[in-house]
Image (tube, rainbow, N blue to C red):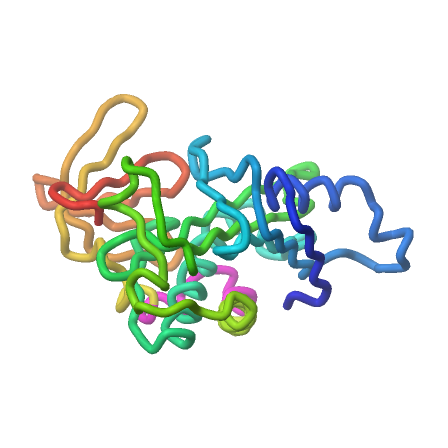
């Protein structure tokens, strides 16, 4: 993984950069058979993106802003939301290796450290017929940022704020990508998360907590019980029925806290 690493001082969004690169076929001019595994890294994003159109705060030279391009993934169209979870697990594992302190996961796309968000993941894909031509996984990790906008003060943090010292961002990228490579191999074996489900659930902060599910037609409350092999969140409703929640279709909120 990360067979080719491309770096820029400033970009609007690493996801946009990765998609433009894939669509332009610049890689063909360089004699590259396909750009699978290309990693795009920037020092600053001027238009960082989060899930559901949210803005991702991206100050220069402090954090990790990167996007991974997967070319024509073998697992099909349903792999995009599942790969968000694979990357989330990889970030949590990589952060623990980097800092020695355990990180957790807030399904589907946040990594949490000391009860606050340190990472968001945005996965996008381009279809070719009924199958993906490519998938882009964007990752933003708060590494050395010391100040956050007031509206994020009780929800976001950084590794530096929580550990009291700055972390090496290059090592952070390396640790995350090493973990992703191992997890991605497992994913490709089964085309789902069955080989990672137990490990993922051990880090899942939503598990056995009350959550509010926000759907297009309303909302309801339940208790998160884990994930299935497809990466869907299993939520027990007030009638005791287990409902499968697919990421991308709903928002999940902690009932009393961020998680």
The percent position of residue 15, horizontal first and vertical second, equals 60, 44
The answer to whether residue 153 of the structure is visible from this angle is yes
Residue 189 colored magenta? yes
Q: Residue 100: x percent and y percent?
A: 34, 78
- In this view, 247 is above or below 196: above
Is residue 184 shown left or right of residue 16?
left
Quarter of the picture containing the N terminus is: bottom right
Left/right placement of residue 198 relative to residue 126 reads: left
Q: Where is residue 125 in the image (x, y as percent from the top left)?
A: 60, 42
User: Looking at the picture, how far across and down is residue 94, in whole percent?
Assistant: 44, 70
Judge by depth and name the residue closer to the eye, 128 or 256: 256
Give the magenta-colored segment's residue range. 187-199
Q: In this view, does 69 lie above or below 169?
A: above
Q: In which quarter of the image is residue 19?
A: top right
What residue do we see at 51% from left, 66% from top? 169
Horizontal side of residue 128 vs 195, given as left or right:
right
The residue shown at (57%, 43%) is 45
């Amino acid at each position: 993984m990360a067979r080719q690493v491309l770096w820029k001082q400033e970009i609007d969004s690493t996801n946009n950069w990765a998609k433009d690169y894939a669509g332009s076929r610049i890689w063909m001019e360089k004699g590259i058979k396909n750009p699978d595994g290309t990693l795009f890294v920037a020092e600053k994003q001027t238009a960082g993106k989060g899930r559901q159109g949210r803005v991702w705060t991206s100050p220069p030279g402090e954090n990790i802003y990167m996007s991974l391009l997967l070319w024509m993934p073998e697992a099909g169209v349903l792999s995009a939301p599942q790969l968000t979870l694979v990357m989330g697990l990889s970030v949590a594992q990589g952060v623990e290796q980097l800092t020695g302190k355990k990180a957790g996961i807030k399904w589907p796309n946040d990594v949490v450290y000391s009860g606050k968000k340190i990472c968001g993941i945005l996965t996008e894909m381009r279809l070719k017929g009924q199958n993906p031509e490519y998938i882009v996984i964007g990752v933003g990790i708060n590494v050395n940022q010391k100040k956050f906008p007031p509206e994020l003060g009780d929800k976001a943090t950084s590794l530096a704020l929580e550990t009291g010292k700055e972390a090496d961002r290059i090592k952070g990228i390396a640790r995350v990508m090493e973990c992703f490579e191992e997890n991605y191999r497992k994913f490709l074996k089964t085309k789902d998360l069955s080989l990672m489900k137990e490990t993922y659930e051990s880090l899942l902060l939503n598990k056995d907590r009350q959550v509010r599910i926000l759907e297009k037609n309303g909302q309801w409350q339940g208790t998160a019980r884990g994930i299935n092999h497809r990466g869907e969140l299993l939520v027990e409703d007030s009638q005791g029925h287990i409902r499968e929640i697919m990421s991308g279709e709903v928002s999940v909120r902690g009932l009393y806290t961020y998680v």
